Amino acid sequence: MYKEANAGTENTVQNAARDVLGVLNRLKIYPYTLIGHSYGGKVAMSMVHQFGRALPRPVQVWVLDTVPGDVWCDDVGDHPRDTIRFCTTLSRPIDSRRALVESLTGAGFTIEGAQWMTTNLKADGNGKFDWTFDLDGIAEMYASYEAYDLWPMLETQPAGLSLDFVQAERSAFVWTPEDVDRIRRTGANVHLLKNSAHWVHIDNPLGLLDILEPSFENMERGFGK
C-alpha cells in the first residue's frame, strides 16, 4: 500500500509521481487505467514502482513512446535538451514571439519547433513576453526523464499490473531491438503505432485509439462484475 510522504523540492520524475499519488491518496481514489506520454510515461511507471508489491485492484498502464531506461534522441531535429539550454541564454523579457522564432531558427532549430516554443510565452503586461514556466525547473525535469531507470519496476512488477508500451514508428527516441525484447520478456507488450512521430495523439489519434480500445473494453467488463 502506498504511504504518502513529502515529495521534496527536486524537479524529478519520482517527485512528480509522488505528487500524483499524494493527490489520489487524499481523494481516496485509484484509477483503473494510467496513460502517460513521454515524460508522463515515466511518471506512470514510477507511480507503480512506488506503490509496492501489490496494487489495490488490477491496473492497466499504457506508456506512450518512451522506454524504461536511458532516453536519447536520434539526429532528427530539435533535441529538447538543446532547446532548453539555448532558451536559458536568451535575454528576458523577450521582445515578441517573432523575436523568439528568429532567435531559435538563427541558432539552427527548426521553424516548427520554434513556433511551438512561442506557445510557452505569456505577456508580461509591459508589451513583452516571458516564459510560462521555470526554465531551470524544466531543465531538471528533462535531465531526470533522460536518466531515470525504471527497468527495476518492469522486472519486479507488482501483482495486478498490466503494462503496455506504444512505440511511434517515426519516434525521435531510439527503441533498440534489445530494449523491445527485454520489455517483452518481462511480460509487457510493445505495440507499433504506424504513421506517427513522437506526438502520437496528434500524428495518428485513430490508430492510437485502435491500440488502446481493447483495454478499455476489458475495463468496462470489469465494471460489470
Image (spheres, rainbow, N blue to C red):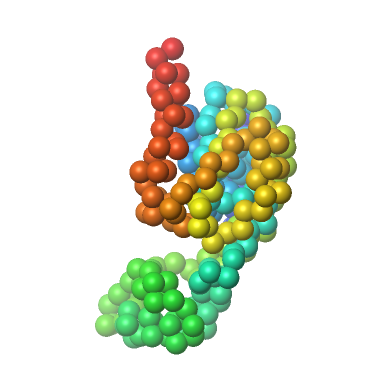
Residue with the most extreme top position: 225
Instruction: State the residue lying farthest toward the front.
Output: 194
Q: Quadrant of the N terminus?
A: top right
Is 49 on the left or on the right of 219, as rendered?
Answer: right
Residue 220 falls in which quadrant of the image?
top left
Q: Position of residue 176 (x, y in %)?
A: 66, 53
Q: Position of residue 164 (x, y in %)?
A: 56, 37
Numbered circles on residues, count: 0
Residue 47 at least partly seen: no
Look at 69% across and 35% down and name the residue there: 186
| Residue at the image point whose x is 62% and y is 53% from the top | 175
Q: Position of residue 59 (x, y in %)?
A: 53, 29
Q: Quadrant of the C terminus?
A: top left
- Along the line of sight, the residue nearer the viewer: 14 or 143: 143
Q: Position of residue 89 (x, y in %)?
A: 52, 83
User: Does residue 87 appear to the left or right of 5 in the view shown?
Assistant: left
In the rendered image of this protein, does residue 107 appear above or below residue 84? below
Q: Residue at x 59, y 29 (%)?
A: 161
Does the rendering let one see residue 198? yes
Residue at left 28%, top 82%? 126
Is 12 placed left or right of 101 in the picture?
A: right
Query: Camera-side residue: 175 or 132?
Result: 175
